[in-house]
Amino acid sequence: MSRLEKQPGELINRLNVIRFTFDGKPVEAYEGDTVGSALYAAGRRTFSRSFKYHRRRGLLCCAGQCPNCIVAVDGAPGVRACTEPVREGMKVEHLNAQPGLELDVMRATDLVGTKFTPPGFYYKTFIRPRKLWPVYEKVLRHAAGLGVLRKEQPEREWRTEYRRRHADVLVVGGGAAGRRAAADAAAQGDDVVLVDEGPVPIEPIAGVEILARASALGYFDGIVPVWQGDTLHQIRARRHVFATGAIEQPLVFAGNDLPGVMLSGGALRLPQLYAVSPGTRAVVATTSDRGLEAAATLHDAGVRIVAVADLRTERTAAARRLAERGIEVLIDHTILAAKGGKTVDGAVLGPNGVEGASVEKTFECDLVVVSGGFAPATSLLLQAGARTRYDAARGSFVLDELPPNVTAVGDVAGVDGAGDDGAAVAVPPPVSGAGHGKCFACLCEDVTAKDIHLSVEEGYDSIELCKRYTTVTMGPCQGRMCQLPAVRLMAKETGQSLEQVGTTTARPPWVSVPMGILAGRPFDPAKRSSIHGRHRELGANIKWAGDWRRAYDYGDPQAEALAVHRAAGLIDVSTLGKLLVRGREAGEFLDRLYPNRFSDLKPGRIRYGVISSDAGRIVDDGTICRIDDDTFYVTTTSSGAGAVEEWFSWWLADWRMDVQLTDLTQGLSAVNLAGPRARDILGELTDLDCSPEGFKYLDGKQAGIAGVSCLILRIGFVGEVGYEIHFAAAHGEHVWDALMRAGADKGIRPFGLEPQRILRLQKMHILVGQDTDSESTPFGAAMPWIVKLDKEQDFIGKWALEHYAIEEPATRLVGFTLANGYVPTEGSVILDGLGDPAGQVTSARFSPVLDRVIGMAWVPSPLARDGSQVTISDEGRTLEAHIQTKPFYDPDGEVLRS
Amino acid sequence: MSFLLTCPNCGVREVTDFGYGGEISARPKSRPTLRELGEYNYFRRNRAGVQREWWFHRSGCRAWFIAERDTATNEVLLTELPADGDGGSSA
């Protein structure tokens, strides 16, 4: 690696050599280098191939602004080599070139000529035959682009985090103006965060948190997300100071994209920060003193300046300082073309506004330094609500109005740099030297000056339409390099002023950001019952059920269901919602929330309830046990637990009754013990009289099981004699084990969610959300008995239910059986007499105890009676089903009550 | 949407901590006509400006409270626990 002698501000540590690879070949760098500076020092000039034409592109800005040095690092595409610090062993690879960066077959698209890829080319060319578009698309996608993502991503090892930071003041930009603003605010006692994306370390400022090498991505309703390494800081500040600076602009001329054409800032950063000489013979083209000063600095660093073109008509002091070094400045001149193959080998200069071979001068060089003025980096400010206007003297869009609590300082506010006297900056022509070759307005998307011309010619003559048609400003640079050139070209083509053309909308993200940073930590929270470990030991098939991980079965759902009928089964139902409703008015509260009565429920008794909305639709269901006069124990569905608690507490907040609500869902576990031997098992474990008379159907009793106090509800959960046992979650496995031990000689089997669904379907117990939807009423769902319209208490849903009690619903929920053993897909369509869809199947299972297929479906009301037949259409299969309105198993509940 | 909201119990929190309960709409005082019932259930004023609305501190104390918010600017004028008659219900 060739380096200059030690530079005063260099960032590299020459004592520490870092080794990495580029396209598999070893590269040596110093600590403090970027991938870009190290590769440049190693002699590399081509860093990427362009998006469309696969032209060679080299370092341009050396500040992470342009798209020219985008590479992949360790498999992650979209990394800018010029700002990416080198790390030992990193694997850097080029993008978008086949077979390699130096020989790219897709270069043909450039050589064949612009005719091949004008704007809208794909849509114009590949429109017919339409059928072939998928084939075209595959090829085109492969040809264009900025890298490839692997189709199958392994679980990422890269851990990213969000951090929320509240501050008084956020300063974006760590230049002189930003640091001053941060220090001033801190001095007044404000809590200040300063964000800077540059490579130069920032001296600590008292009272200021400095986030270095961190990029502000956008401004979202007062939150500024800042990407720093593995962290996304979400910063919310009361006041924002933007010190985002100004972005040096390129000039639009022929070959302005050749490797070796560099912005003056980039040409200076290489020697000053990394002691890398950008070239040996340089031609400089500038519109302000910036380029002249760069020429002087490069000269002093040993670069031979062969020619300098200054667009301005007056010789400034900077030009005279160059003359002292023996460098003559061509006044009122500009660059028309950069020439060369792999890199620049010459530059054509000419007087401004005059073209032709007679006035042009060609200079041999290996570096073209360009400075086309500066555009304030206003994007974040615009996102925050600022407005800009065109400033003819500066030749750029400058800040005009700022929203409250937002300030701009430094170059972005136009306080220094160009502007004060007329000679400070010249506004460049939209394009020069067009006769020499392609002149690029947009490097990201390969949009030439000619493409903008074609866009206007075809009618896309506003900047926003042109943007969408040509994709100018839509690439990785987000308009940094191309917004102003595109607006100038648009003004030229349409004859409008720049003010009239305006700019495109500034949108986030302002900086390319990996998706992983936005995604944050891979976070998949799961709820598990306190008995979960036992299910795993038993080899349960565990699946997601809402937020929960649940045992679907233990290997044989049919046998598990049969065990419940023949002996006993035990299922973990800890996921049920459990609410304690207490207080003097608890009974009345429930009377207002449910269509049936609870205030008359006797202590120790249980009643089923369906919650309806004020629109009369089923919201949830569950059982309610009155524990004492003031205390009700309410269970809800597993998936509805949170929503029911919100629903109850909402009405309670409104009604302000003497009621306390406690959500016990997470604190209590529950199991359901069911089957003909359930009574024996429970009797062995408690002192309770478990006889049919002593512990009746719908009794709720408190008793100890294996030393744990439990609430035992005798309900008809799965259709056999059954007890739902609720207890403190900490004792989950202990109670489970005690029940399984007591049942061991009685044929007990654990059963999962799938056999539970079979058993409940046999009883036509609805599953809210599966058998009902947001339109289902208790009347349609065959539960008219649950609605007590004669109840003196007004209740939620009463008025709507009064209406639905009279109006015949279009469809009703009924059971059906199928003869031939095929289980229809849930969601299959019920057809009416004309063969049109008229309902749907909501549940279907094979019932081992009944030895046939059973299900539930919404069918047209006239067909919703015993003995009628409906047609089910299941993806091309047609099935005849028999309607049944009473439960398939134990229709009169004799087993249940026994 | 992003702003800060002050829970009357817990204090200032990010809005993502809360659940939105919608604008406060008056529940009919007595048996409504079908049309009134439909309007209560399904129609919203959808005001662009200051409105009173329900919020739920879902990731916090799980209390419902009332906020006055400008829907056009997300400026929150006040938050408070409901007092009698605030929630718009008659029951």
Image: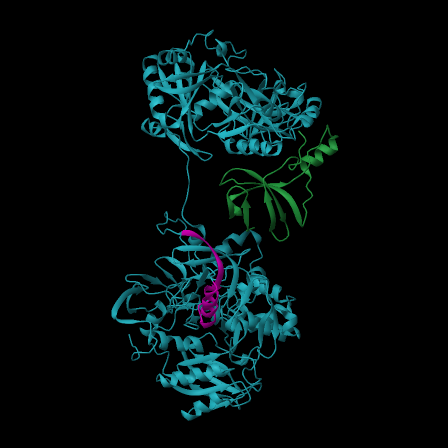
Chain colours: A cyan, B green
Q: Position of residue A746 (x, y in %)?
A: 35, 12
Q: Position of residue A320 (x, y in %)?
A: 46, 91
Q: Is residue A605 left or right of residue A557?
A: right
Query: What is the tally of numbered marks visible in this picture?
Result: 0
- Residue A722 seen in this snapshot: yes
Q: Is residue A554 left or right of residue A817?
A: left
Q: Position of residue A138 (x, y in %)?
A: 48, 55
Residue A172 colored in magenta in the image: yes
Q: Is residue A277 above or below residue A894?
A: below
Q: Quadrant of residue A541?
A: top left
- Residue in front for this viewpoint, A374 or A57: A374
- Residue in front for this viewpoint, A764 or A586: A586
- Toward the left, the furthest residue is A15
Q: Position of residue A80 (x, y in %)?
A: 41, 65
Which residue shows up at 51% across the image and 45% down it?
B11
Q: Quadrant of residue A872?
A: top right
Which residue shows up at 55% across the image and 63% down it?
A406
- Toward the front, the furthest residue is A188
Which residue shows up at 55% across the image and 66% down it?
A407
Q: Is residue A170 above or below residue A454?
A: above
- Residue A825 seen in this snapshot: no
Q: Is residue A574 above or below residue A720?
A: below
Q: Which residues are magenta?
A: A161-188
- Residue in front for this viewpoint, A885 or A787: A787
